């Protein structure tokens, strides 16, 4: 039996100041697609507490530390920029983080889990399994339940977080080709738009 390769090393930039975030957002303004993920804690609270935002523009990865940043306006503007598509995987809890912490719903959005379901990979396939399927890479799972509000984050935590967005661009490119070939792209886009609208309605009502 052939063994699935372990993940390769990943590089990232750690952002924990207003100035560094503003500078990065200027570069990201020119992006057409941004991959997103979050880490959060929800042990003693009803809503998730934001602990980390991960972002990839397809070339570079950034880990954004919400505990060290106060000025979120440039980042929030990017998240609702209609010219920039946001890719997430299994976005429901991430959207709650954005709603609770920033009062926004990233849009327009693509959920690669939704795309996977329409490509008949199952209704709730994990990110790790999607990466294994498309990239033939085995990702670690050891930091899933770790304390994401501790500081400093460990190197293992940072790398785990960076890997969560490292392959989303490539996966979405492959899924785009498959969805178009099967004539399911519009169906998938409508489902992702419905999902974003659902959370936007909650934002305007309950939050």
Image (spheres, rainbow, N blue to C red):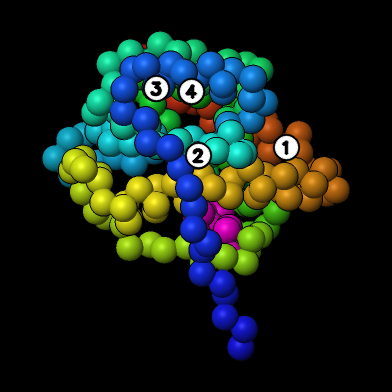
Q: What element carries label 1?
A: helix
> Mark 4 packing: few (<14 Cα in 10 Å), some, or many (20+)?
some
Q: Mark 2 points at which residue?
A: 61
Residue appearing at x 25%, y 33% in the figure: 49
Relative to 124, residue 183 above or below: above
Q: Is mark 4 on a helix, strand or loop?
A: helix
Q: Is residue 89 magenta-colored?
A: no
Instruction: Give the mark nearer the N terminus: 3 vs 1.
Output: 3
Q: Name the residue under label 1.
A: 187
Instruction: Give the mark nearer the N terminus: 1 vs 2.
Output: 2
Q: Quadrant of the N terminus?
A: bottom right
Q: Can residue 29 be seen in this view?
A: yes
The picture quadrant where one finds residue 67 is top left
State if disc 1 and disc 3 touch (CB < 8 Å): no
Q: Is residue 129 magenta-colored?
A: yes
Extreme residue toward the bottom, this view: 1
As measured in the structure, the alpha-carbon distance from the residue carrying label 3 to the one carrying label 2 is: 14 Å
Q: Name the residue under label 4.
A: 24
> Mark 2 packing: few (<14 Cα in 10 Å), some, or many (20+)?
many
């Amino acid at each position: 039996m052939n063994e699935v390769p372990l993940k390769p090393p990943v590089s990232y930039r750690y952002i924990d100041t207003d100035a560094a975030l503003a500078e990065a957002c200027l570069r990201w303004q020119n992006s057409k697609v941004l991959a997103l993920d979050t880490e959060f804690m929800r042990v003693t609270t009803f809503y998730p507490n934001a602990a980390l935002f991960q972002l990839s523009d397809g070339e570079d990865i950034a880990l954004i530390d919400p505990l060290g940043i106060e000025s979120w306006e440039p980042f929030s503007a990017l998240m609702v920029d209609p010219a920039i598509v946001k890719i997430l995987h299994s976005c429901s809890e991430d959207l709650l983080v954005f709603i609770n912490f920033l009062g926004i719903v990233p849009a327009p959005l693509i959920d690669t889990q939704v795309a996977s379901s329409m490509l008949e990979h199952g209704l709730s396939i994990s990110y790790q399994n999607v990466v294994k399927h498309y990239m033939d890479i085995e990702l670690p799972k050891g930091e899933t339940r770790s304390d994401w509000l501790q500081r400093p984050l460990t190197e293992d935590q940072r790398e785990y977080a960076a890997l969560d967005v490292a392959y989303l661009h490539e996966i979405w490119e492959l899924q785009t080709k498959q969805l178009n070939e099967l004539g399911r792209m519009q169906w998938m886009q409508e489902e992702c738009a419905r999902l974003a609208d659902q959370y936007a309605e909650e934002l305007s009502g309950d939050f």
